[in-house]
Amino acid sequence: MYKVVEFDGGAKAMHKFVNDQAAEGYSFVQAVYMTTYQWRLFFKIATDGN
C-alpha cells in the first residue's frame, strides 16, 4: 500500500515529516519536486507485516 502526500516546506521540516511517517510504519520511497518548497512525497507500508 502506498501513501502520497503533498508537502510544502523546507528540508528541515521535510526531514521531520519523513521521520514522523516512519514512526507510523511508512517507509520513504521518493520525493518529486513540484515548485520551490512544494513536493509530492511517496511512502510505502507493508500490508503483510514486512
Image (cartoon, rainbow, N blue to C red):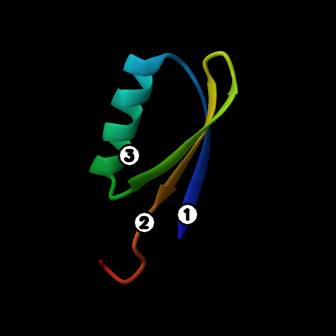
Residue 36 position (above or below residue 46): above
Compute the Cα span from label 1 to label 3: 12 Å
Please, what is the three-letter code of the amino acid marked with disc 2? Ile
Q: Label 2, label 3: how many angstroms apart (C-alpha)?
A: 10 Å
Q: Secondary structure at mark 2?
A: loop
Query: In front: 31, or 18?
Result: 31
In the image: residue 24, left or right of residue 43: left
Specify the amino acid type for callout 3. Gln
Would you say the residues marked 2 and 1 are in contact, meaning their CB atoms lie under 8 Å apart?
Answer: yes
How many C-alpha atoms fall within 10 Å of the one at disc 1: few (<14), some, or many (≥20)?
few
- Badge 2 crowding class, 10 Å Cα cut-off, few under 14, some 14 to 19, many 20 or more, is some
* Amino acid marked by disc 1: Tyr
Q: Mark 2 — residue?
A: 45
25 in relation to 8, above or below? below
* 23 lies above or below 13: below
Work out whether mark 2 precedes mark 1 in sequence or the reverse, and give the earlier one.
Answer: 1
Secondary structure, mark 3, is: helix
Q: Which mark is residue 21?
A: 3
Residue 23, position in %: x, y? 27, 48
Residue 21 in the image: state x and y as whole percent.
38, 46
Which residue in the rendered view is the most extreme toward the right? 35
The Cα–Cα distance between marks 2 and 1, rounded to whole angstroms, is 6 Å
Q: Residue at x 42, y 66 (%)?
A: 45
- Residue depicted at x 62% and y 31%: 39
* Location of residue 7 (image quadrant): top right
Which image quarter holds the C terminus?
bottom left
Q: Residues within 10 Å of mark 3 (few under 14, many from 20)?
A: some
Residue at the disc numbered 1:
2
